[in-house]
Image (spheres, helix red, strand yellow):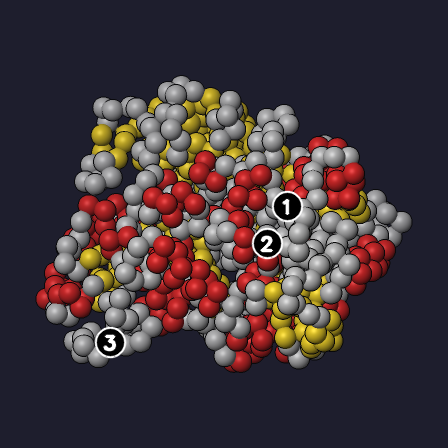
Amino acid sequence: MDAKTLQNYETSELLRFTTAGSVDDGKSTLIGRLLYDSKAIFEDQMEAIEEASMRSGADEVNLALLTDGLRAEREQGITIDVAYRYFATPKRKFIIADTPGHVQYTRNMVTGASTANAALILVDARHGVIEQTLRHAFIASLLQIPHVVVCVNKMDLVDYSEEVFEEIRTVFMGFAGKLAIKDIHFIPISALKGDNVVNRSTKMDWYQGPTLMYLLEHVYIGSDNNHIDARFPVQYVIRPQSAEYPDYRGYAGRLASGTLRKGDAVVVLPSGFSSHVKSIDFYKDSLDIAYAPQSVTITLEDDIDISRGDMIVRENNRPEISQDIDIMICWLNDKPMRPGGKYALMHTSNEVRCMIRDVKYKIDINTLDRNNEDKSIGMNDIGRLSIRTTKPLYFDSYRQNRVTGSLILIDEATNETVCAGMIV
Amino acid sequence: MKNFRLNHLRELEAESIYVIREVAAQFERPVMLFSGGKDSIIMFHLALKAFHPARLPFPLLHIDTGHNFKETLDFRDALMKKTGTRLEVRYVEDSIKAGKVAEEKGPNASRNRAQTVTLLDALEELKVDAAMGGGRRDEEKARAKERFFSHRDEFGQWDPKNQRPELWNIFNGRKNMGEHFRVFPISNWTELDVWQYIALENIELPSLYFTHEREVVNRDGVWLAKSPYLQLKEGEKWERRVIRFRTIGDMTCTGAVESPADTLEDIINEVAASRTTERGGRADDKRSEAAMEDRKKEGYF
């Protein structure tokens, strides 16, 4: 990082990406390489992991120790949980959600994927596309990660062969054709040697595309947010009741999608009352326009009873409203789903209860086949459910809106988050 | 056509404000931990933004180890007065006097660990159901696995292997009686982000962060400030150095760096070029590889 970074900080963007795979794919080496080459690994961190590597008797510095933060992880040499890592270049700041490949892989990958703009999928060039690769691609598609980057790693071990790379691309695309991935890239790399990670490889003239770092810095994320449908879930009502602001009543929240302007004709759900945006306040400023994902405070021209869980939308662009909803789910808990069971449900700023009415099907994550017979849903299972909620939800399909289309189910006995749901 | 994009600082800001508001909405008796360090100062600034023009719907809580820099306390009191914010202070000294925790002995004695006892007592006394802290995931490897909403059992303990999955921006704050949450609104900020944001927003800081001359001692490669709470070991001596602090905590374990940086711009450049983490100067983290994880499990922030 140089002084230029600092002049750029007012224009630099945030990119969140997820990396999934096992240690064998060279994932830790790749992350270590990105962090190291962008100077995000500090000397004291490097010293600490050098020391720890030596103690465990390894020959080389084990970069995985950088991401394995918990004692049990270091002792067992496995990654248990999603770890977040940060680095920055002059163009962008990056947040990596690093998810483990082994234990509870689906649950963790779904968690990491839920907020990601991009997914890095690692393929070992020697082994080609394996079951795990397809699982990762499927989850990226299920969670609607806008950009997928397939990194064909260990190219140095296959003599930097173009044929090997092309074969993998063809096999992957054959599978990806069945999925809904909007934007997909393939890069031949060697994380260990540094080919095409940050620096362009001199050994693969046949590859004309970008390096991984260039792609991460330049992939167009401007349309990752939904800019069309204005959705403002009310999070909190601000009423100062002070001498200076005796009658102020502001609706605080974060725009889930779209834009709202001063003067816009809006309607409040569920009451259906209409009004106009009187002001958009942000601390001591008054804005003409607010857009996702800004956190602002909105005041309306009319006195309407509005509370947390309500949603402010444009009069002529409304979400769906229903109590009967179909969702794609990933089950996240040891305790299996109870058919017909009741769960607490959180969706935007709304909390309701719901009942599981039906398991439509389960998906075999390795073949993508639908199983209509097996109705049991347990840890890491993916399937489609029909639920009925105690009150109507105002929502969009997850495909159109990752914020108003997502929900979680909570076990009311343990309070644990047991299910991730994406509205169909 | 306007480009509807937030820069990374504004996006982090929007996320943190969202989290803070979520705490105010989901919990009945939240508090925000305040130490006088830069992270709690920006977290407080974000809270002011979240509820403007109303006052904060929760008090701040300072766990005072009794080993604070005077500059920090003066700064804290001035800031509370200026913003009309309610502040609760609880003292580690009182926990020691009550016999709830023993004072560490020896030249490396620190009240860092003892403050967990005071903190847990304060949370119980104030019936707190959510305590916000300025922890960041980039600070330390155990913190890298921390959730925004981190569940604590009735003993205030953290179970890192059994954390609730946290998806999208939906935060599950449900709990049983006696349990509470630790919430980390600035989880995704790095040290550099914090400094850039301080510059962008022109946020006032304690003078300790800027260069000054001070009597210090070099212990295990870390400069520690002269204070009545620190005993010299054999062979050690006080020296006058031009230093500043990268983090501010207990005087006995917060290390200074030699630095001439006296403006925010200088500091940002220094941080960007730095090759060691800010916690590299924290003696409390150097005690063992899992020092932070162990303290967090007990209820440390």
Q: Which residue is mark 3?
A: A201
**Picture quadrant of residue B46:** bottom right
**Residue A341 percent across, percent down from the top left:** 43, 20
Horizontal relation, residue B47 to residue A384: left or right: right
Chain designation of label 3: A
**Residue A353 percent across, percent down from the top left:** 52, 26
Label 2 vs label 3: CA separation?
43 Å
Label 1 vs label 3: CA separation?
50 Å
Q: Tell me, for residue B284, which label it has, or none.
A: 2
Horizontal relation, residue A267 to residue B45: left or right: left
**For the residues bearing labels 1 and 2, Cβ distance under 8 angstroms:** yes
Residue at the image position 43 percent from the left and 64 percent from the top: A47
Tell me the kind of residue under disc 1. Answer: Arg
**Picture quadrant of residue A65:** bottom left
Q: Which residue is mark 1?
A: B113
Q: Earlier in the sequence, mark 1 or mark 2?
A: 1
Q: Please rate how many residues cluster around mark 2, counting C-alpha atoms within 10 Å: few if below 14, some from 14 to 19, many from 20.
A: many
Q: Please rate how many residues cluster around mark 3, counting C-alpha atoms within 10 Å: few if below 14, some from 14 to 19, many from 20.
A: some
For mark 2, give the secondary structure.
Answer: helix
Instruction: Judge by depth and name the residue closer to the eye, A256 or A9.
Output: A9
